[in-house]
Amino acid sequence: MLGGQPIIILRENVERNRGLEAQRSNIAAAKAIASAVRTTLGPRGMDKMLVSGTGDVTITNDGVTILQDIAVQHPGAKMVIEVAKAQDDEVGDGTTTAVVLVGSLMEKAEGLLVKKIHPTVIGQGYRMGMEKALEILDELSITIDPYDRDTLVKIADTAMTGKSIESVKHKLDGIVVDAVMTVAEKKDGGVIVDEDNILIKKQTGETMDDAELVSGIVLDKTRISDDMPKKVAGARIALVASPMEIKKTQVKAKIHISSREQISAFSDQERATLKKFADAVIDSGANVLLCQKGIADAVAYYLAHGGVLAVEDVPEKDMKFAALALNAEIVNKAEDLNKENLGFADLVEQPENAEILKISGCENPKAVTILLRGSTDYLLDELERAVVDGTRVVMDVMEDRKVLVGGGAVETELLMKIHEYASSVGGRVQLAIEAYAKSFEVIPETLAENSGFNPLDKLVDLKNAHSKGKKNAGLNVFTGKIVDMLKEGVVEPHRSKRQSIQSSAEAAILLIRVDDMMITRETGKMPGME
Ligand SMILES: Nc1ncnc2c1ncn2[C@@H]1O[C@H](COP(=O)(O)OP(=O)(O)O)[C@@H](O)[C@H]1O
Ligand SMILES: [Mg+2]
């Protein structure tokens, strides 16, 4: 600053919004984003159809998918979308909730600004309210045994309701929970789960009911020769990283070798080398081979005659995953193979009419595959999103061991308790804390509205139940009755609510404090500039 006056030189292409105008603009943007997703909230929420510039269609109920797909320009709106992304990264569920909460917090802030309450005071009140909310959340949380399968199934079920997959949800619940429980590892008195150890594969053509959990891996590969078996029971599987071919042969690389005479087209020395590759595999006792690189036709010929089912050019990622699933070791060269580094599976099979290789029935796998089937790509994609949400919440709960009830019960408890707390604070900041408390109303209200019930009536009913000490009272979105959500089995990870409360408040506080926005527009090259 020079002499008290700030000197700001802005380029012509910078648009500037100041004071109330900047605040209004951010509030409007946050509300617009929230209203774009709020109709999808809850089991009876509606789906959205998104059409991209290139005409690709997505039909989804998933908050973060909707937000990632719609192009927004407004910086305030972008921040709200960041909240959804953070929620998705940290938790895997609760994205709509987080965004709807930011919208509500901004709307309540608007009311406070009109009453001439300074943004700093609003920020302070919101922060105090958030801290109180997190405290209450801890008190409300229910500790569970991480291996309590029944509860884990309920967690998966709550996260997967409302997607257009209702008919197979119960089957998927079990698949998801068993997948996570299989790959979960006990460590330092706790449980950790690595998401990367669960692979989700999609296959079009069959019905959704055919979804299955494969204790092993599904590769997008087929056997390299028709002379190889299509099915190997009691599989002993070799994993080889190097190519099984000779770099320069005198024979054209791509002739198909099907008879002994053609083999003799190779020089004796080449033939010996190629046969050695195949023999190394067969001698190790393997009857299935996954090779990360190419396998020469001659080698394939010898392997087929040895009864070995082989696939080539398996991506490195899949090789590593197979090693985990099979408890096997990837050897560099075929000659390093022995009984110890092979993996075992009940069955390796190339199903009829499918370009896949399914390796199933691995013993104690550290990695598993969820194989989804469906008639269309839209359905498969939504199915995948639901399964991803389901696996993520089950992981969260196995790691944290803490759950909370859903159906608006926690939000009702929060809004009442925080309101009570506000009155103990006093001053202007009390108004901000009260507004913070009130912003939670949006969750039970929206759940009611999306289910065709009167939001105000349901909110009153909920408050009445909670004032009688019924902490778990929530809305049954199918009957409209206020019921005990724990008994209904509507449970969610503690992590999900914690994250949505924290990130929504932080985003709102940040946005309210902005009173000067400078937006540079892309204008291309300025005349006269290089
Ligand atoms: N069976 C149910 N009954 C009542 N509420 C439910 C039920 N299942 C889920 N909910 C509620 O729906 C909300 C989550 O909706 P959802 O559309 O999955 O959005 P999000 O993206 O926030 O996860 C939560 O408030 C949750 O408690
Ligand atoms: Mg959800």
Image (tube, helix red, strand yellow):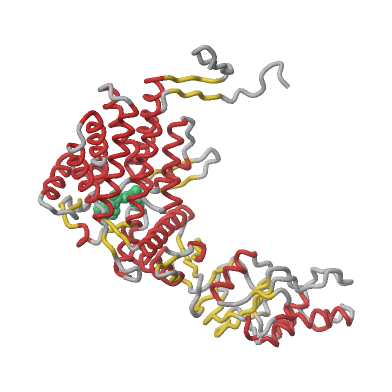
Where residue 130 sits in the image (x, y, percent)?
30, 42
Q: Residue at x 47, y 33 (%)?
A: 72
- Total label count? 0
As drawn, 251 above or below 496? below
Q: Residue at x 40, y 20 (%)?
A: 19
Judging depth in this view, the residue of 58 and 274 nearest the camera is 274
Q: Residue at x 32, y 34 (%)?
A: 124
Where residue 393 sits in the image (x, y, percent)?
38, 59
Query: Which of the 4 image quadrants contains residue 431?
Result: top left
Say left or right for 518 vs 116. right
Say left or right for 516 vs 457. right
Judging depth in this view, the residue of 141 and 218 nearest the camera is 141
Query: Which of the 4 image quadrants contains residue 27?
Result: top left
As drawn, 246 above or below 200? below
Where residue 95 sits in the image (x, y, percent)?
38, 47
Can you see residue 97? no
